[in-house]
Image (cartoon, rainbow, N blue to C red):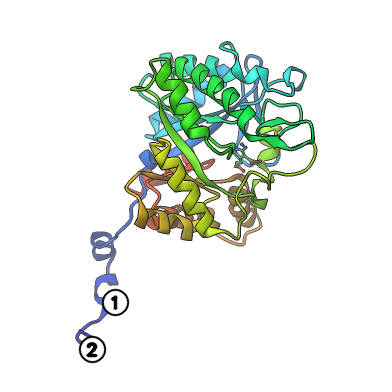
Amino acid sequence: MSYPASRLRRLRRTEGLRRLVRETRLDPADLILPLFVVPGVGVRRPVGSLPGVEHLSVDGAVEDARRAADLGVGGVMLFGVPDPRDKDAVASVARRDDGLVPETLRAIRSAVPDLVLTTDLCLCGYTDHGHCGVIGADGHVENDATLPLLAEMALVHGAAGADVLAPSDMMDGRVAAVRAALDGEGLGERVAIMAHAAKFASGFYGPFRDAAHSAPSFGDRRSYQLDPANGREALREADQDELEGADILLVKPALPYLDVLARLADRTDVPLAAYQVSGEHVVLQAAAAAGALDLRRATLEALTAVRRAGARLIVTYAAKEVAGWLHERH
Ligand code: PBG
């Protein structure tokens, strides 16, 4: 059927009709809010490079987790930001049971029992060199020597009550290593893995380095993160992570990689996630602050596009703000 029998505008005529045929909806439960936990008590310090994001001590993280839960946000993702003096070459502080993330997991679990707790599983926030793995004699990031450290970190987070671990290091074989460690310690039934299956070596991570104090002190991450030019390779990464036991596959950043999300959605039935990263967040916030666009409209559009491309859930710094907007709309 073609024009004039077919007139696509008929179903766009009123908001009621548009709502009826809307293919993609955004719900607070789709969103995961990242939280950055620092040492101390009563700390709540804005992160200069990331509007709306704060460094929080454990008590503050519990407050924000409660606020997020009250707004219906789907979960939180914890990042530890330790004292720089506690960092070493092998990220020892990341593997301590009394570390920032395990303490926060326990505190949130007892205060807000039903909130889904996810953690970033990576060494870069805890190593003195800022890389996501251990450094070999010749200065390169050693894949296989990193895996047992990630596995240990995973056990600490799992034992402290994490529901979902999100390995973001991009070492080969880390999903299998983490899965085996969890299963070996009796955490197989309880702790899921949301693998950063397709994490690109992106310029959009700039503002995050300030939040997590995790910038590499030499070199860059291009020897382990994906080349932004490569979509097919991203699918291979995702296939491997799925085979190794990933429960959720995550694409990061989100908006510049919608093609990857859409291709993954065609290819696998594993739930997909996307991470709207710091640079994507700042682009929207800065453009809105400059009066160039409407923050609410542009943010909801960007997140809806990410859902439309195939992401079931989205990690976003704007989760609380967006949840508030969605409640007003209903
Ligand atoms: C590192 C990590 C990064 C982000 C989350 N975990 C950045 C990096 O690779 O340097 C970036 C998130 C963001 O930009 O919001 N494991």
Which residue in the structure is indicated by mark 2?
A: 4
At which x and y percent is residue 214?
A: 70, 34
Amino acid type at circle 2 is Pro
Q: CA distance from mark 2 to mark 1?
A: 11 Å
Which residue in the structure is indicated by mark 1?
A: 9
Q: Secondary structure at mark 1?
A: helix
Q: Pick whichever, 121 or 41, lies toward us.
A: 121
> Quadrant location of residue 74?
top left
Q: Pick whichever, 236 or 205, lies toward us.
A: 236
Q: Residue furthest bottom?
A: 4
Left or right, 320 with reference to 292: left
Residue plotted at (60% across, 60% down) = 229
Left or right, 119 with reference to 202: left
The answer to whether residue 274 shows anywhere in this view is no
Left or right, 73 with reference to 134: left
At which x and y percent is residue 198?
A: 52, 48
| Quadrant occupied by the N terminus | bottom left
> Quadrant location of residue 270?
top left
Q: Secondary structure at mark 2?
A: loop
- Location of ligand 1 given as a quarter of the image: top right
At which x and y percent is residue 104?
A: 53, 18
Residue plotted at (46% across, 15% down) = 159
Q: Which mark is residue 129?
A: none
